[in-house]
Image: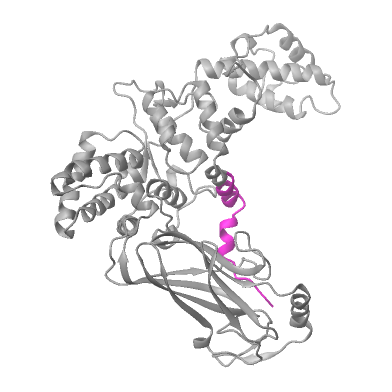
Amino acid sequence: MNMVGGVRLAGGLACAIAVAGMPAMAGGQPVQPRAGDAAEPRAVLDRYCVGCHNERMKDSYAGLALDTLDLTAAPAHAEQLEKVVRKVRSGQMPPAGRRRPDDATRESLARWLEVELDRAAAADPNPGRKEAFHRLNRAEYRNAVRDLLAIDVDVAALLPTDDAGYGFDNIAGVLRISQSQLEQYLAAARKISREALGSPLPAAAVTEYRVAETQPQYEHIDGLPFGTRGGLLVQHHFPRSGDYEIAIDLLCRIQGECDGSVGFPDPHELEVAIDGERVALFTLEPRGEFRPHEERTWRLRLPVTAGTRDLSVAFLKLPSIREADARVERFLKPHYVTGVVGEPSQMIFQPFVDRVTIAGPFGSTSTGETASRRAILTCRPAGEADEASCATEILSSLLRRAFRRPATAADVEQVLPVFSAGRDAGGDFEAGIEAALRRILVSPEFLFRIERDPDGIAPDTNYRISDLELASRLSFFLWSSIPDDELLALAERGTLSEPAVLERQVRRMLADPRSDGLARNFFDRWLELHKMEAIHMDWA
Protein backbone atom coordinates (compact mmCIF):
# COMPACT_ATOMS: atom_id res chain seq x y z
CA MET A 1 0.00 0.00 0.00
CA ASN A 2 1.43 3.32 -1.08
CA MET A 3 0.43 6.64 0.45
CA VAL A 4 -0.20 9.57 -1.84
CA GLY A 5 -0.23 13.23 -0.85
CA GLY A 6 -2.57 15.90 -2.13
CA VAL A 7 -0.19 17.01 -4.91
CA ARG A 8 2.49 15.23 -6.87
CA LEU A 9 5.40 16.99 -5.17
CA ALA A 10 4.02 16.85 -1.63
CA GLY A 11 6.39 15.48 0.96
CA GLY A 12 9.65 16.95 -0.30
CA LEU A 13 11.53 20.23 -0.48
CA ALA A 14 10.33 20.64 -4.06
CA CYS A 15 6.75 20.95 -2.78
CA ALA A 16 7.38 24.02 -0.68
CA ILE A 17 9.59 25.67 -3.27
CA ALA A 18 7.21 24.92 -6.12
CA VAL A 19 4.09 26.05 -4.29
CA ALA A 20 5.76 29.11 -2.82
CA GLY A 21 7.78 30.29 -5.79
CA MET A 22 6.39 29.10 -9.13
CA PRO A 23 4.41 31.71 -11.04
CA ALA A 24 2.52 29.14 -13.14
CA MET A 25 -0.83 29.73 -11.46
CA ALA A 26 -4.13 30.83 -12.98
CA GLY A 27 -7.16 31.67 -10.88
CA GLY A 28 -5.51 30.08 -7.85
CA GLN A 29 -5.34 26.66 -9.54
CA PRO A 30 -2.17 24.94 -10.82
CA VAL A 31 -1.82 25.00 -14.61
CA GLN A 32 -2.28 21.47 -15.98
CA PRO A 33 0.02 20.52 -18.90
CA ARG A 34 -1.64 19.50 -22.14
CA ALA A 35 -0.80 16.34 -23.95
CA GLY A 36 1.37 16.85 -27.01
CA ASP A 37 1.91 15.09 -30.30
CA ALA A 38 4.75 12.58 -30.07
CA ALA A 39 5.75 13.00 -33.72
CA GLU A 40 8.06 15.99 -33.22
CA PRO A 41 10.00 14.62 -30.22
CA ARG A 42 10.20 11.27 -32.02
CA ALA A 43 11.86 13.00 -34.97
CA VAL A 44 14.34 14.79 -32.68
CA LEU A 45 15.35 11.52 -30.99
CA ASP A 46 15.68 9.75 -34.34
CA ARG A 47 17.91 12.49 -35.72
CA TYR A 48 20.20 13.13 -32.75
CA CYS A 49 20.05 10.13 -30.39
CA VAL A 50 19.10 6.86 -32.07
CA GLY A 51 22.44 6.62 -33.89
CA CYS A 52 23.98 5.40 -30.61
CA HIS A 53 21.01 4.55 -28.38
CA ASN A 54 19.41 1.77 -30.39
CA GLU A 55 18.55 -1.85 -29.85
CA ARG A 56 21.68 -3.11 -31.60
CA MET A 57 24.15 -0.90 -29.70
CA LYS A 58 22.37 -0.40 -26.36
CA ASP A 59 24.83 -2.57 -24.41
CA SER A 60 27.58 -0.09 -25.24
CA TYR A 61 25.47 3.01 -24.56
CA ALA A 62 23.97 2.85 -21.05
CA GLY A 63 21.56 0.04 -21.98
CA LEU A 64 19.20 2.59 -23.54
CA ALA A 65 17.39 1.80 -26.80
CA LEU A 66 15.41 4.80 -28.02
CA ASP A 67 14.55 3.44 -31.46
CA THR A 68 12.05 0.94 -30.04
CA LEU A 69 10.74 3.14 -27.23
CA ASP A 70 7.08 4.10 -27.69
CA LEU A 71 6.68 7.77 -26.77
CA THR A 72 2.90 7.50 -26.85
CA ALA A 73 3.15 5.20 -23.82
CA ALA A 74 5.37 7.40 -21.65
CA PRO A 75 4.21 5.90 -18.31
CA ALA A 76 5.58 2.52 -19.33
CA HIS A 77 9.05 4.00 -19.93
CA ALA A 78 9.21 6.56 -17.13
CA GLU A 79 12.58 5.40 -15.78
CA GLN A 80 14.31 5.61 -19.17
CA LEU A 81 12.70 8.93 -20.07
CA GLU A 82 13.76 10.48 -16.75
CA LYS A 83 17.36 9.66 -17.71
CA VAL A 84 16.87 11.28 -21.10
CA VAL A 85 15.48 14.46 -19.52
CA ARG A 86 18.42 14.77 -17.11
CA LYS A 87 21.00 14.31 -19.86
CA VAL A 88 19.28 16.70 -22.27
CA ARG A 89 18.68 19.37 -19.62
CA SER A 90 22.30 19.28 -18.46
CA GLY A 91 23.63 19.44 -22.03
CA GLN A 92 25.52 16.16 -21.64
CA MET A 93 23.68 14.58 -24.54
CA PRO A 94 24.27 14.50 -27.40
CA PRO A 95 27.96 14.52 -26.41
CA ALA A 96 30.49 17.04 -27.66
CA GLY A 97 31.69 16.24 -31.16
CA ARG A 98 28.34 14.80 -32.23
CA ARG A 99 25.60 16.56 -34.14
CA ARG A 100 23.58 18.51 -31.56
CA PRO A 101 20.20 20.26 -31.70
CA ASP A 102 19.95 24.00 -31.19
CA ASP A 103 18.84 25.36 -27.82
CA ALA A 104 15.20 25.81 -28.83
CA THR A 105 14.93 22.22 -30.08
CA ARG A 106 16.61 20.84 -26.97
CA GLU A 107 14.30 22.90 -24.71
CA SER A 108 11.23 21.75 -26.64
CA LEU A 109 12.20 18.08 -26.32
CA ALA A 110 12.95 18.33 -22.60
CA ARG A 111 9.73 20.23 -21.91
CA TRP A 112 7.61 17.72 -23.83
CA LEU A 113 9.12 14.80 -21.95
CA GLU A 114 8.65 16.55 -18.58
CA VAL A 115 4.99 17.27 -19.31
CA GLU A 116 4.33 13.67 -20.29
CA LEU A 117 6.13 12.32 -17.23
CA ASP A 118 4.25 14.70 -14.92
CA ARG A 119 0.96 13.68 -16.52
CA ALA A 120 1.80 10.00 -16.05
CA ALA A 121 2.75 10.55 -12.39
CA ALA A 122 -0.46 12.48 -11.69
CA ALA A 123 -2.60 9.81 -13.35
CA ASP A 124 -0.94 6.89 -11.56
CA PRO A 125 1.16 8.10 -8.61
CA ASN A 126 3.48 5.65 -6.95
CA PRO A 127 5.29 7.39 -4.08
CA GLY A 128 6.44 4.19 -2.42
CA ARG A 129 5.96 3.13 1.17
CA LYS A 130 6.60 5.48 4.12
CA GLU A 131 7.46 4.34 7.63
CA ALA A 132 4.23 4.08 9.63
CA PHE A 133 5.98 5.07 12.90
CA HIS A 134 8.32 8.06 12.92
CA ARG A 135 9.74 9.12 16.29
CA LEU A 136 10.26 12.82 16.87
CA ASN A 137 13.93 13.74 17.01
CA ARG A 138 15.27 16.10 19.67
CA ALA A 139 14.69 19.26 17.65
CA GLU A 140 11.12 18.23 16.80
CA TYR A 141 10.45 17.26 20.42
CA ARG A 142 11.67 20.63 21.66
CA ASN A 143 9.59 22.53 19.11
CA ALA A 144 6.51 20.41 19.78
CA VAL A 145 6.74 21.08 23.53
CA ARG A 146 7.26 24.78 22.84
CA ASP A 147 4.19 25.05 20.60
CA LEU A 148 2.06 22.82 22.82
CA LEU A 149 2.91 24.30 26.22
CA ALA A 150 4.55 27.68 25.47
CA ILE A 151 7.74 26.64 27.26
CA ASP A 152 11.25 26.22 25.84
CA VAL A 153 13.21 23.25 27.16
CA ASP A 154 16.88 22.33 26.93
CA VAL A 155 16.53 18.97 25.19
CA ALA A 156 20.29 18.41 25.17
CA ALA A 157 20.14 18.13 28.97
CA LEU A 158 17.07 15.86 28.90
CA LEU A 159 17.41 13.49 25.95
CA PRO A 160 20.26 11.57 24.29
CA THR A 161 21.64 12.47 20.88
CA ASP A 162 19.61 11.04 18.01
CA ASP A 163 21.03 8.43 15.67
CA ALA A 164 21.61 9.61 12.11
CA GLY A 165 21.32 8.02 8.70
CA TYR A 166 23.30 9.48 5.78
CA GLY A 167 24.17 12.33 8.15
CA PHE A 168 20.55 13.30 8.88
CA ASP A 169 18.74 12.80 12.17
CA ASN A 170 15.13 12.87 10.90
CA ILE A 171 15.06 9.54 9.07
CA ALA A 172 12.36 7.30 10.51
CA GLY A 173 14.31 4.10 9.95
CA VAL A 174 17.07 5.06 12.40
CA LEU A 175 14.95 6.84 15.03
CA ARG A 176 14.29 3.86 17.25
CA ILE A 177 13.62 3.95 20.98
CA SER A 178 15.33 1.87 23.67
CA GLN A 179 14.47 1.13 27.28
CA SER A 180 16.99 3.70 28.51
CA GLN A 181 15.59 6.32 26.13
CA LEU A 182 12.08 5.60 27.39
CA GLU A 183 13.24 6.27 30.94
CA GLN A 184 14.73 9.58 29.80
CA TYR A 185 11.44 10.53 28.12
CA LEU A 186 9.66 9.78 31.41
CA ALA A 187 12.10 11.99 33.32
CA ALA A 188 11.73 14.73 30.71
CA ALA A 189 7.93 14.57 30.97
CA ARG A 190 8.13 14.95 34.76
CA LYS A 191 10.38 17.98 34.52
CA ILE A 192 8.46 19.66 31.70
CA SER A 193 5.00 19.18 33.23
CA ARG A 194 6.23 20.49 36.60
CA GLU A 195 7.90 23.57 35.11
CA ALA A 196 5.03 24.32 32.74
CA LEU A 197 2.56 24.52 35.62
CA GLY A 198 5.04 26.00 38.10
CA SER A 199 4.55 23.25 40.66
CA PRO A 200 6.54 23.67 43.90
CA LEU A 201 9.94 21.97 43.86
CA PRO A 202 11.30 19.92 46.78
CA ALA A 203 14.58 21.86 46.43
CA ALA A 204 15.92 24.76 44.40
CA ALA A 205 16.55 23.77 40.79
CA VAL A 206 19.96 24.48 39.25
CA THR A 207 20.42 25.09 35.52
CA GLU A 208 23.78 25.68 33.87
CA TYR A 209 24.41 27.39 30.52
CA ARG A 210 27.88 27.19 28.96
CA VAL A 211 29.30 29.45 26.29
CA ALA A 212 30.26 27.41 23.23
CA GLU A 213 33.95 27.35 22.42
CA THR A 214 33.10 28.51 18.90
CA GLN A 215 31.23 31.57 20.18
CA PRO A 216 33.31 34.72 19.54
CA GLN A 217 34.00 36.63 22.74
CA TYR A 218 35.78 39.68 21.31
CA GLU A 219 32.84 40.86 19.20
CA HIS A 220 29.21 41.80 19.65
CA ILE A 221 26.82 38.82 19.62
CA ASP A 222 23.47 39.07 17.87
CA GLY A 223 20.61 39.49 20.31
CA LEU A 224 22.72 41.02 23.07
CA PRO A 225 22.56 44.77 23.83
CA PHE A 226 24.47 47.04 21.48
CA GLY A 227 27.76 48.23 22.89
CA THR A 228 28.58 44.86 24.46
CA ARG A 229 30.99 42.09 23.56
CA GLY A 230 30.98 38.37 24.19
CA GLY A 231 28.79 36.74 26.82
CA LEU A 232 25.65 34.79 26.12
CA LEU A 233 21.89 35.15 25.76
CA VAL A 234 19.52 32.43 26.95
CA GLN A 235 15.79 31.98 27.34
CA HIS A 236 15.22 30.62 30.83
CA HIS A 237 11.92 29.51 32.29
CA PHE A 238 11.43 30.69 35.87
CA PRO A 239 8.69 28.31 37.08
CA ARG A 240 7.63 30.32 40.13
CA SER A 241 7.99 33.87 41.37
CA GLY A 242 10.69 34.18 44.02
CA ASP A 243 14.38 34.86 44.59
CA TYR A 244 16.92 33.37 42.17
CA GLU A 245 20.71 33.31 42.33
CA ILE A 246 22.66 33.95 39.13
CA ALA A 247 26.34 33.00 39.11
CA ILE A 248 28.68 34.06 36.28
CA ASP A 249 31.95 32.16 35.90
CA LEU A 250 34.79 33.85 34.02
CA LEU A 251 37.44 32.03 32.07
CA CYS A 252 40.68 32.72 30.27
CA ARG A 253 41.80 30.56 27.39
CA ILE A 254 45.40 30.58 26.29
CA GLN A 255 47.02 27.38 25.08
CA GLY A 256 44.27 25.50 26.90
CA GLU A 257 42.32 26.54 29.97
CA CYS A 258 43.39 28.21 33.19
CA ASP A 259 41.23 28.10 36.29
CA GLY A 260 40.28 31.69 36.92
CA SER A 261 40.48 35.14 35.42
CA VAL A 262 44.02 36.40 34.98
CA GLY A 263 45.15 39.98 34.94
CA PHE A 264 44.16 42.66 32.44
CA PRO A 265 45.32 46.28 32.14
CA ASP A 266 41.88 47.96 31.89
CA PRO A 267 38.73 47.80 33.98
CA HIS A 268 35.90 45.71 32.53
CA GLU A 269 32.20 46.10 33.22
CA LEU A 270 30.02 42.99 33.23
CA GLU A 271 26.31 43.63 32.62
CA VAL A 272 23.46 41.30 33.57
CA ALA A 273 20.02 41.99 32.09
CA ILE A 274 16.61 40.30 32.17
CA ASP A 275 14.24 40.99 29.28
CA GLY A 276 16.56 43.80 28.18
CA GLU A 277 16.51 45.59 31.56
CA ARG A 278 19.82 45.86 33.41
CA VAL A 279 19.66 44.19 36.82
CA ALA A 280 23.36 44.29 37.75
CA LEU A 281 26.64 45.82 36.61
CA PHE A 282 29.90 44.41 37.99
CA THR A 283 33.23 46.22 37.63
CA LEU A 284 36.34 44.08 37.22
CA GLU A 285 39.23 46.24 38.35
CA PRO A 286 42.51 46.12 36.37
CA ARG A 287 45.13 43.87 37.88
CA GLY A 288 48.19 41.87 36.97
CA GLU A 289 47.97 38.96 39.35
CA PHE A 290 46.24 35.64 38.96
CA ARG A 291 42.91 35.21 40.73
CA PRO A 292 42.25 31.76 42.19
CA HIS A 293 39.20 29.70 41.31
CA GLU A 294 36.94 30.93 44.10
CA GLU A 295 37.39 34.55 43.00
CA ARG A 296 36.45 34.08 39.37
CA THR A 297 32.69 33.76 40.07
CA TRP A 298 30.39 36.77 40.31
CA ARG A 299 27.01 36.29 41.97
CA LEU A 300 23.78 38.18 42.39
CA ARG A 301 20.48 37.29 44.00
CA LEU A 302 17.27 38.99 42.93
CA PRO A 303 13.50 38.48 42.78
CA VAL A 304 12.12 37.31 39.43
CA THR A 305 8.50 36.98 38.36
CA ALA A 306 7.51 33.57 37.00
CA GLY A 307 7.67 33.09 33.24
CA THR A 308 10.08 32.53 30.35
CA ARG A 309 12.54 35.42 30.20
CA ASP A 310 15.59 36.50 28.20
CA LEU A 311 18.71 36.54 30.39
CA SER A 312 21.80 38.21 28.95
CA VAL A 313 25.31 38.43 30.38
CA ALA A 314 27.92 40.43 28.48
CA PHE A 315 30.86 42.79 28.88
CA LEU A 316 30.46 46.43 27.95
CA LYS A 317 32.70 46.95 24.94
CA LEU A 318 36.08 48.64 25.46
CA PRO A 319 37.00 51.66 23.37
CA SER A 320 38.20 50.28 20.05
CA ILE A 321 41.72 51.65 20.48
CA ARG A 322 42.21 49.82 23.78
CA GLU A 323 40.73 46.65 22.37
CA ALA A 324 43.18 46.77 19.48
CA ASP A 325 46.04 47.41 21.90
CA ALA A 326 44.98 44.45 23.98
CA ARG A 327 45.01 42.14 20.97
CA VAL A 328 48.44 43.32 19.86
CA GLU A 329 49.82 43.12 23.40
CA ARG A 330 48.58 39.57 23.69
CA PHE A 331 50.95 38.44 20.95
CA LEU A 332 53.87 40.85 21.33
CA LYS A 333 54.23 40.88 25.12
CA PRO A 334 53.48 37.44 26.50
CA HIS A 335 53.13 37.19 30.28
CA TYR A 336 53.02 34.16 32.51
CA VAL A 337 51.04 33.46 35.66
CA THR A 338 50.92 30.39 37.86
CA GLY A 339 47.59 28.57 37.79
CA VAL A 340 45.98 26.40 40.42
CA VAL A 341 47.66 23.29 39.04
CA GLY A 342 51.05 24.98 39.14
CA GLU A 343 51.44 25.18 35.37
CA PRO A 344 52.29 28.50 33.65
CA SER A 345 49.58 29.92 31.41
CA GLN A 346 50.08 32.74 28.96
CA MET A 347 48.17 35.86 29.87
CA ILE A 348 45.34 37.48 27.92
CA PHE A 349 43.96 40.93 28.41
CA GLN A 350 40.21 40.42 28.18
CA PRO A 351 38.15 38.15 30.44
CA PHE A 352 35.54 35.86 28.91
CA VAL A 353 32.24 34.53 30.20
CA ASP A 354 32.53 30.77 30.58
CA ARG A 355 29.14 29.78 32.01
CA VAL A 356 26.08 31.09 33.80
CA THR A 357 24.28 29.12 36.51
CA ILE A 358 20.74 29.90 37.68
CA ALA A 359 19.50 28.46 40.98
CA GLY A 360 16.09 28.84 42.59
CA PRO A 361 13.49 29.71 43.46
CA PHE A 362 14.26 30.54 47.09
CA GLY A 363 11.37 31.72 49.22
CA SER A 364 8.92 31.10 46.37
CA THR A 365 5.68 33.03 46.70
CA SER A 366 3.44 31.98 43.81
CA THR A 367 3.35 30.47 40.34
CA GLY A 368 2.29 33.71 38.71
CA GLU A 369 0.42 33.85 35.42
CA THR A 370 2.88 32.48 32.86
CA ALA A 371 2.40 31.81 29.15
CA SER A 372 2.66 28.07 29.77
CA ARG A 373 -0.06 28.13 32.43
CA ARG A 374 -2.33 30.09 30.10
CA ALA A 375 -1.71 27.55 27.34
CA ILE A 376 -2.62 24.63 29.63
CA LEU A 377 -5.28 25.94 32.01
CA THR A 378 -7.99 26.93 29.53
CA CYS A 379 -10.53 26.90 32.37
CA ARG A 380 -10.42 27.17 36.18
CA PRO A 381 -12.89 25.22 38.35
CA ALA A 382 -14.98 27.36 40.69
CA GLY A 383 -15.20 24.48 43.14
CA GLU A 384 -14.62 20.76 43.55
CA ALA A 385 -17.90 19.99 41.75
CA ASP A 386 -16.57 21.68 38.58
CA GLU A 387 -13.22 19.91 38.52
CA ALA A 388 -14.23 16.91 36.40
CA SER A 389 -15.79 18.98 33.61
CA CYS A 390 -12.92 21.50 33.63
CA ALA A 391 -10.33 18.70 33.55
CA THR A 392 -12.13 17.15 30.58
CA GLU A 393 -12.02 20.47 28.71
CA ILE A 394 -8.32 21.03 29.45
CA LEU A 395 -7.26 17.49 28.61
CA SER A 396 -9.33 17.37 25.40
CA SER A 397 -7.56 20.51 24.17
CA LEU A 398 -4.11 19.18 25.11
CA LEU A 399 -4.80 15.79 23.52
CA ARG A 400 -6.00 17.36 20.26
CA ARG A 401 -2.87 19.46 19.87
CA ALA A 402 -0.43 16.84 21.17
CA PHE A 403 -1.85 13.99 19.06
CA ARG A 404 -2.40 16.23 15.99
CA ARG A 405 -6.00 15.02 15.58
CA PRO A 406 -9.38 15.40 17.32
CA ALA A 407 -9.38 13.82 20.77
CA THR A 408 -11.72 10.85 21.04
CA ALA A 409 -13.77 9.86 24.06
CA ALA A 410 -11.41 6.91 24.52
CA ASP A 411 -8.40 9.27 24.61
CA VAL A 412 -9.98 11.34 27.37
CA GLU A 413 -11.08 8.28 29.31
CA GLN A 414 -7.48 7.04 29.38
CA VAL A 415 -6.09 10.18 31.03
CA LEU A 416 -8.96 11.10 33.37
CA PRO A 417 -8.04 8.33 35.87
CA VAL A 418 -4.46 9.66 35.83
CA PHE A 419 -5.83 13.12 36.61
CA SER A 420 -7.89 11.76 39.49
CA ALA A 421 -4.93 9.86 40.96
CA GLY A 422 -2.68 12.90 40.68
CA ARG A 423 -5.31 15.14 42.21
CA ASP A 424 -5.71 12.81 45.20
CA ALA A 425 -1.94 12.46 45.68
CA GLY A 426 -1.13 16.14 45.24
CA GLY A 427 -4.14 17.52 47.02
CA ASP A 428 -5.32 20.01 44.41
CA PHE A 429 -6.67 20.36 40.87
CA GLU A 430 -3.38 21.43 39.26
CA ALA A 431 -1.55 18.40 40.64
CA GLY A 432 -4.03 16.23 38.73
CA ILE A 433 -3.52 18.21 35.51
CA GLU A 434 0.24 17.88 35.93
CA ALA A 435 -0.03 14.09 36.25
CA ALA A 436 -2.28 13.86 33.18
CA LEU A 437 0.06 16.10 31.17
CA ARG A 438 2.97 13.88 32.14
CA ARG A 439 1.02 10.90 30.75
CA ILE A 440 0.32 12.72 27.47
CA LEU A 441 3.98 13.64 26.96
CA VAL A 442 5.05 9.98 27.04
CA SER A 443 2.20 8.72 24.87
CA PRO A 444 3.24 7.08 21.56
CA GLU A 445 0.71 9.36 19.86
CA PHE A 446 2.85 12.34 20.91
CA LEU A 447 6.34 10.87 20.61
CA PHE A 448 5.67 9.28 17.22
CA ARG A 449 4.16 10.48 13.98
CA ILE A 450 1.82 7.62 13.13
CA GLU A 451 0.10 7.06 9.78
CA ARG A 452 -2.49 4.32 9.41
CA ASP A 453 -3.72 2.45 6.33
CA PRO A 454 -7.42 2.91 5.55
CA ASP A 455 -9.62 0.05 6.67
CA GLY A 456 -10.13 -2.64 4.03
CA ILE A 457 -7.44 -1.37 1.65
CA ALA A 458 -6.02 -4.04 -0.64
CA PRO A 459 -2.26 -4.67 -0.75
CA ASP A 460 -0.26 -2.60 -3.28
CA THR A 461 -3.10 -0.11 -3.63
CA ASN A 462 -2.31 3.59 -3.87
CA TYR A 463 -4.39 5.85 -1.65
CA ARG A 464 -4.41 9.46 -0.54
CA ILE A 465 -3.29 10.20 2.98
CA SER A 466 -5.85 11.91 5.19
CA ASP A 467 -5.92 15.67 5.63
CA LEU A 468 -4.82 15.23 9.25
CA GLU A 469 -1.79 13.22 8.15
CA LEU A 470 -1.07 15.83 5.48
CA ALA A 471 -1.20 18.58 8.13
CA SER A 472 1.29 16.68 10.29
CA ARG A 473 3.64 16.03 7.36
CA LEU A 474 3.49 19.66 6.32
CA SER A 475 4.09 21.11 9.79
CA PHE A 476 6.96 18.78 10.66
CA PHE A 477 8.56 19.44 7.27
CA LEU A 478 8.29 23.24 7.29
CA TRP A 479 8.33 23.92 11.04
CA SER A 480 9.79 20.75 12.59
CA SER A 481 6.83 20.97 14.95
CA ILE A 482 3.15 20.19 15.44
CA PRO A 483 0.38 21.80 13.36
CA ASP A 484 -1.04 25.04 14.70
CA ASP A 485 -4.76 25.59 15.27
CA GLU A 486 -5.41 27.00 11.80
CA LEU A 487 -3.76 24.10 9.99
CA LEU A 488 -5.42 21.55 12.26
CA ALA A 489 -8.86 23.12 11.81
CA LEU A 490 -8.58 22.96 8.01
CA ALA A 491 -7.50 19.32 8.23
CA GLU A 492 -10.43 18.51 10.50
CA ARG A 493 -12.81 20.05 7.94
CA GLY A 494 -11.18 18.05 5.13
CA THR A 495 -10.27 21.11 3.06
CA LEU A 496 -6.49 21.22 3.54
CA SER A 497 -5.80 18.98 0.53
CA GLU A 498 -7.62 21.34 -1.84
CA PRO A 499 -4.87 22.82 -4.07
CA ALA A 500 -5.73 26.48 -3.46
CA VAL A 501 -6.04 25.95 0.31
CA LEU A 502 -2.81 23.96 0.44
CA GLU A 503 -0.94 26.66 -1.47
CA ARG A 504 -2.16 29.39 0.89
CA GLN A 505 -1.12 27.36 3.92
CA VAL A 506 2.35 26.65 2.53
CA ARG A 507 2.87 30.35 1.83
CA ARG A 508 1.64 31.25 5.32
CA MET A 509 3.88 28.69 6.97
CA LEU A 510 6.95 29.74 4.99
CA ALA A 511 6.34 33.34 6.09
CA ASP A 512 6.28 32.24 9.73
CA PRO A 513 9.63 32.56 11.60
CA ARG A 514 9.34 28.89 12.57
CA SER A 515 10.16 27.97 8.96
CA ASP A 516 13.73 29.23 9.51
CA GLY A 517 14.38 25.89 11.14
CA LEU A 518 13.86 24.14 7.79
CA ALA A 519 17.04 25.63 6.31
CA ARG A 520 18.90 25.75 9.62
CA ASN A 521 18.31 22.07 10.43
CA PHE A 522 19.10 20.97 6.87
CA PHE A 523 22.42 22.80 6.59
CA ASP A 524 23.32 21.95 10.18
CA ARG A 525 23.19 18.25 9.30
CA TRP A 526 24.39 18.50 5.69
CA LEU A 527 27.49 20.55 6.57
CA GLU A 528 27.84 18.84 9.98
CA LEU A 529 27.77 22.19 11.75
CA HIS A 530 26.34 20.49 14.84
CA LYS A 531 29.77 18.94 15.39
CA MET A 532 31.32 22.36 15.97
CA GLU A 533 30.29 22.20 19.62
CA ALA A 534 32.60 19.21 20.10
CA ILE A 535 35.62 20.97 18.61
CA HIS A 536 38.23 22.12 21.12
CA MET A 537 39.58 25.47 20.01
CA ASP A 538 43.33 26.14 20.16
CA TRP A 539 43.54 29.71 21.42
CA ALA A 540 47.31 29.85 21.32
Q: Quadrant of the N terminus?
A: top left
Task: In this rendered view, identify the residue nearer to me: 65 or 508.
Answer: 508
* Position of residue 115 measured from the top left corner of the image (x, y, whole percent): 64, 17
Q: Is residue 256 above or below residue 215?
A: below
Task: In this rendered view, identify the residue nearer to me: 266 or 276.
Answer: 276
* Position of residue 389 measured from the top left corner of the image (x, y, whole percent): 19, 41
Give the main secondary structure, helix, strand or loop, of the magenta stretch: helix
Task: In this rendered view, identify the residue nearer to me: 358 or 121.
Answer: 358
User: At 34% across and 20% down in the image, what residue appears?
Assistant: 458
User: At 32% across and 48% down in the image, what residue appears?
Assistant: 376
Task: In this rendered view, identify the residue nearer to me: 425 or 2.
Answer: 425
Q: Is residue 188 visible?
A: yes
* Position of residue 313 measured from the top left corner of the image (x, y, whole percent): 55, 70
Residue 288 quadrant: bottom right
Q: Report whether 123 appears left or right of 306.
A: right
Q: Quadrant of the C terminus?
A: bottom right
Q: Is residue 391 above or below residue 301?
A: above
Magenta stretch: includes residue 529:
yes
Q: Is residue 59 visible?
A: no
Magenta stretch: includes residue 283:
no
State the colouring used for the structure image: one colour
Q: Which residues are magenta?
A: 519-540
* Position of residue 169 measured from the top left corner of the image (x, y, whole percent): 49, 49
